[in-house]
Image (cartoon, rainbow, N blue to C red):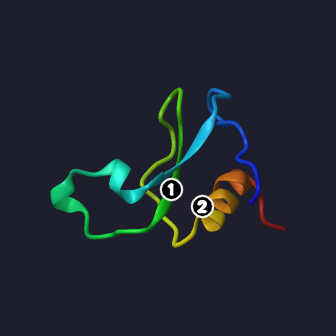
Amino acid sequence: MDKLKPCPFCGGEAKIMTHESYVPESWRSLVGVYGVVCTSCRAGGYQFWDTEEQAIAAWNRRGEQNG
């Protein structure tokens, strides 16, 4: 598994989170999906992927330009 890059906003440590970590229990319809969040400034948004590897790849390529 690839290592998460630091937060692009504050340089803080990023962490893999499950959907259950983000929402109240009454909203937990998406079980077993993954996102990434900064442990310092909480940047990360509400984007989720099916695997930890997909979440890491998306976090690590943020800000890249196509072409």
The crowding category of the residue bearing disc 1, from other C-alpha atoms within 10 Å (few below 14, some 14 to 19, many at least 20), is many
Q: Residue furthest right?
A: 67
In the picture provided, is 5 more to the left or to the right than 29?
right
Is there CB contact under 8 Å for labels 2 and 1? yes
Give the residue pinned by disc 1: 35
Give the residue pinned by disc 2: 55
The image quarter containing residue 25 is bottom left
Describe the element under mark 2 as helix, strand or loop: helix
The structure residue drawn at horizontal position 28% and vertical position 52%, both measured from the top left corner, is 23
Q: Earlier in the sequence, mark 2 or mark 1?
A: 1
Q: Disc 2 marks which amino acid?
A: Ala
Q: Is residue 13 above or below residue 65?
A: above
The structure residue drawn at horizontal position 59% and vertical position 63%, both measured from the top left corner, is 52
- Work out whether residue 21 or residue 65 is closer to the camera in this orientation and state it: 21
Describe the element under mark 1 as helix, strand or loop: strand
- Work out whether residue 20 or residue 58 is closer to the camera in this orientation and state it: 20
Residue 45 circle label = none
The image quarter containing residue 33 is bottom left
In the picture provided, is 44 more to the left or to the right than 1?
left
The structure residue drawn at horizontal position 42% and vertical position 54%, both measured from the top left corner, is 46
Q: Quadrant of the C terminus?
A: bottom right
The image position of residue 13, as x and y in percent, is 64, 33
The image position of residue 12, as x and y in percent, is 63, 29
The structure residue drawn at horizontal position 76% and vertical position 56%, both measured from the top left corner, is 2
The image position of residue 31, as x and y in percent, is 35, 69
The crowding category of the residue bearing disc 2, from other C-alpha atoms within 10 Å (few below 14, some 14 to 19, many at least 20), is many
In the picture provided, is 24 more to the left or to the right than 42?
left
Q: Residue furthest left?
A: 26
What separation in Å lies between label 2 and label 1 (alpha carbons)? 5 Å
Q: Is residue 26 above or below residue 30?
A: above
Q: Quadrant of the N terminus?
A: bottom right
Q: Disc 1 marks which amino acid?
A: Gly
